[in-house]
Image (tube, rainbow, N blue to C red):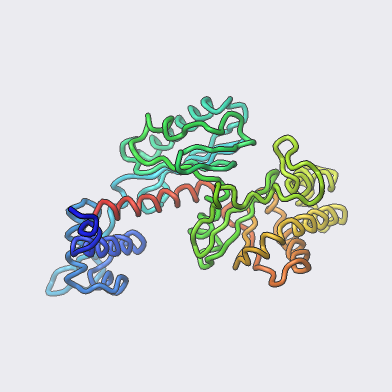
Amino acid sequence: MSTESRGSGPHVLRRLNASAVLTALRTGGPQRVADLMARTGLTRPTVAQALTLLEHAGWIEPVTDADASPRKGRPAQLVTFRAGAGCLAGVDVGPHKAIALITDLIGRPLAEIRVPTEGAGDGPELMTLIADTVRAALRQAGRTEDEVHAVCIGSPGIADPANRTFRLAPSIPGWASLPLDAELGRMFRCPVLVENDVNLSVLAERWQGVATEAGTVMFVHWGSRIGAGITVGGRLHRGRSGAAGEIGFIDLDESPSLVDGMGPLERVVGADAIGRLGGADPSAVLRAAADGDPVALTAIDTVAARFARGLAPALLVLDPELVVIGGGVSRGGPTLLDALDRHLRARTLVPPRLALSALGDRAGVLGAVRACLDNLEQTLADGL
C-alpha cells in the first residue's frame, strides 16, 4: 500500500470522525446522538458510524437516561466513554516529597499518596521509592499495573522527553540521566513520560486552574528555586533543549551563574532571600507582611522589585495573557502579588494580568495527569 493511500481515503475520514466523537464523549460525559451531532458538526449517519467503530474498539458503552422523557414508551439512549476501562498515573518528584496520583481515563482522581523524599538516597533508590509509591496508590485505587495506560513523571530539571530522562537535575542527587522508562518499564506496559515539573504546572493551570481561558500563559514557580512553564497558543513551549523557562538563572549582576546549584535570580528572590531580609523563617515573614508588619513589608517589596527586574525581559519577549504565581512564596497572597504588579508596571510596556495559583503543591501532579490524558488521546486516535 502506498503512503498516499494510507494517508487518505474513506478509512482516514472515518477515523477522524470517530476521533472527534470520542473527544466529545471524553470531555462531555454521556450524550445522545443529537448531542454529539451538535458538538462535532457531523451528520447523524456519520455519528452513528463513528459510534459503531468506537463500540467495537471497546471505548464506549450505552447507558440509560432514566430522567429523560421517554419516546414511544422507551427511555432515551445515551452513550458514554468507558472511563473506568483503565487508569493513569501522575507522579511529581521533588527534593522534599513525591506525590503519586491515580485517576480514571478522564482524569477523575481514584487515589493519591504522598511520601517524603529527603534521605531517600541516590537516583536508583529514589526510583525504587517512586515505584513502591505508585504500587501503593494503585492498590488504594483498586487497580493493577496492567490497567495503567500512561505514566508521567514530573521533576525539577531539564527533561529529555524523547529519551525519558532528565539531562540536568541539580536539586535531586543521582536523578540526572537515570533511564526512567527502563526502570518503570519493568513495572508497566505503557508509555512512560517525563517532563519538567513547572511545565506540568502550567498544563494543570490551563486544565483545572486559573488559566483555562488563556492561550499564552507563564506559570512561575516561586519558592527556594525559581522556574517558569510557558504555553504559547495553548501549546507547551519547551525550547530547543528543554530549558525554556529557567528564569532562575537570569543574571542581575556580574555574580557567577551557579553557586551550589542555585541561579543568580534564585539567590536574591527565592524563599531564603525573603528569610534573610525579614530576619525570620520565610513563611513567618510572609505571614507578618500579610498582617502589615513594616519590616516584613519592606522585605517583600525589596524582593518583588528584584524579581520584577529579572522577570520583565521574559514578559517583554512573550507578552503573555496571564502570569500565574505558584510555589511556596505564593502564600504571600495579595500583598506579594500587589508588590510584584507595582514593580512590573514600571518595567513593562503592557503589564500582564497576574494571578495566584489555586492548585497549591498539587499543580505538578495534576499536570502529570494532564500529560497522560494528552498521550492517551493521541493513542486512542492512532488506534482507531
The answer to whether one can see residue 79 in this image is no
Can you say which quadrant of the picture contains the C terminus? bottom left
Q: Reply above or below: 336 against 193.
A: below
Across and down, in percent, residue 2 comes to 20, 55
Q: Reply above or below: 271 against 126.
A: below
Residue in front for this viewpoint, 169 or 24: 169
Q: Reply above or below: 13 against 281.
A: below
* Left or right for 351, reference 242: right
Farthest residue in the right direction?
295
- Name the residue located 77 percent from the left edge and 62 percent from the top edge: 339
- Name the residue located 83 percent from the left edge and 52 percent from the top edge: 299
- Name the residue located 75 percent from the left edge and 68 percent from the top edge: 345
Across and down, in percent, residue 254 comes to 82, 47
* Quarter residue 70 falls in: bottom left
Across and down, in percent, residue 217 comes to 57, 62
Farthest residue in the left direction?
72
